[in-house]
């Protein structure tokens, strides 16, 4: 371990290096593509073509649609996105997006996956400090109704290590989430076949993450025989613009250290 709107696409192909694998960035729960913009901009600046889809019901925010959507619907949406790639992408997923990245690597040929503050297949983690906030939204989750995270919960559990101005700016962009999806995760109904995940895997977690503790990151890394990078002193929101040097740069180094692979440029469905 080292210490250390649906389908938004970077079309600046003059800056993108076509020899580099494309990147698929997937946002987390109660989030949206705008939250991934610091990483999209950073990797695009390094010559990577980036695709940043919105999970259904997230951008634009649509609580009525979220009443009908579960994990399978989110997975179907990102599956549709990855099937349009001309060659296997590297999938970078944050939080819930990391769980979806694992599901994609189970079903598709991915060049690699990077799991940032990722949820694990199986039951949701319940750190003691998070339980009071979970209890507030628990009735809605159990009823399968959309829920919205409280500002206090976001500041305490998700954004606590960030500068105050950045915290306030980020909070304005959070959106409601599917209670159906969280109920499925709460009861451990999401599974990934670890033997089917054959691509390189990097797990990145904050050493002070209050939502997905490092013990979960170690569990995920063990599941896939993955490399694990812990970012000391930082929490769940490693995708913050202020943490590019701390979190995104180590990911870039890992990606650029991957062995070259023969790229499959056949029809997109050929790497399913």
Image (spheres, grey):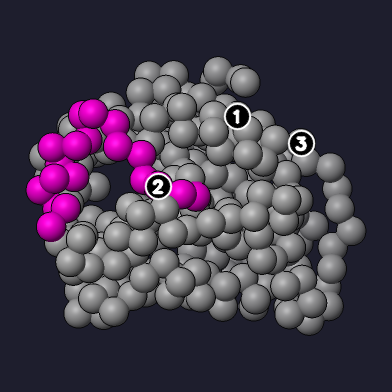
65, above or below 9, in the image:
below
Disc 3 packing (10 Å; few <14; some 14–19; many ≥20) = few
Q: Residue 50 in the image: x percent, y percent?
A: 57, 60
Between residues 223 and 29, which one lies in front from this camera angle?
223
Q: Residue at x 15, y 41 (%)?
A: 133
Which residues fall within the magenta stretch? 121-139
Q: Is residue 158 magenta?
A: no
Q: Residue at x 44, y 45 (%)?
A: 119
Please, what secondary structure does the residue beneath circle 2 have?
A: loop
Of badges 3 and 2, the one in the foreground is: 2
Residue identified by numbered label 1: 228
Q: Residue at x 48, y 75 (%)?
A: 77
In the picture, residue 252 is in which quadrant? top right
Residue identified by numbered label 2: 123
In terms of secondary structure, what is the magenta stretch mainly?
helix
Q: Residue 208 in the image: x percent, y percent?
A: 35, 23
Q: Residue at x 73, y 40 (%)?
A: 256
User: Which label belongs to residue 257?
Assistant: 3
Of badges 1 and 2, the one in the foreground is: 2
Disc 2 packing (10 Å; few <14; some 14–19; many ≥20) = some
Between residues 74 and 131, which one lies in front from this camera angle?
131
Cα separation, mark 1 vs mark 3, equals 15 Å
Please, what secondary structure does the residue beneath circle 3 have?
A: loop
Of badges 1 and 3, the one in the foreground is: 1
Please, what secondary structure does the residue beneath circle 1 have?
A: strand
Q: Is residue 262 left or right of residue 227?
A: right
């Amino acid at each position: 371990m080292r210490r250390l709107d649906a389908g938004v696409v970077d079309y600046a192909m003059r800056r993108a290096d076509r020899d580099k694998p494309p990147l698929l960035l997937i946002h987390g729960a109660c989030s949206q593509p705008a939250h991934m913009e610091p990483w999209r901009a950073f990797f695009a600046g390094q010559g990577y073509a980036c695709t940043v889809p919105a999970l259904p019901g997230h951008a634009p925010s649509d609580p009525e649609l979220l009443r009908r959507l579960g994990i399978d619907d989110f997975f179907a949406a990102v599956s549709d996105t990855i099937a349009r790639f001309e060659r296997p992408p590297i999938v970078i997923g944050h939080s819930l997006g990391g769980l979806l990245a694992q599901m994609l690597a189970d079903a598709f040929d991915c060049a690699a996956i990077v799991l940032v503050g990722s949820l694990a297949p199986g039951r949701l983690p319940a750190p003691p400090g998070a339980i009071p906030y979970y209890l507030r939204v628990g009735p809605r989750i159990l009823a399968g109704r959309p829920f919205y995270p409280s500002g206090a919960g976001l500041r305490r559990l998700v954004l606590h290590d960030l500068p105050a101005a950045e915290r306030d700016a980020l909070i304005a962009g959070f959106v409601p989430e599917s209670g159906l999806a969280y109920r499925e995760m709460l009861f451990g109904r999401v599974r990934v076949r670890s033997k089917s995940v054959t691509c390189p895997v990097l797990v990145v977690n904050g050493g002070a993450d209050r939502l997905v503790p490092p013990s979960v990151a170690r569990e995920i890394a063990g599941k896939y025989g993955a490399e694990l990078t812990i970012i000391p002193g930082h929490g769940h929101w490693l995708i913050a613009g202020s943490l590019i040097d701390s979190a995104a740069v180590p990911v870039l180094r890992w990606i650029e250290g991957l062995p070259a692979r023969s790229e499959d440029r056949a029809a997109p469905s050929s790497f399913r």
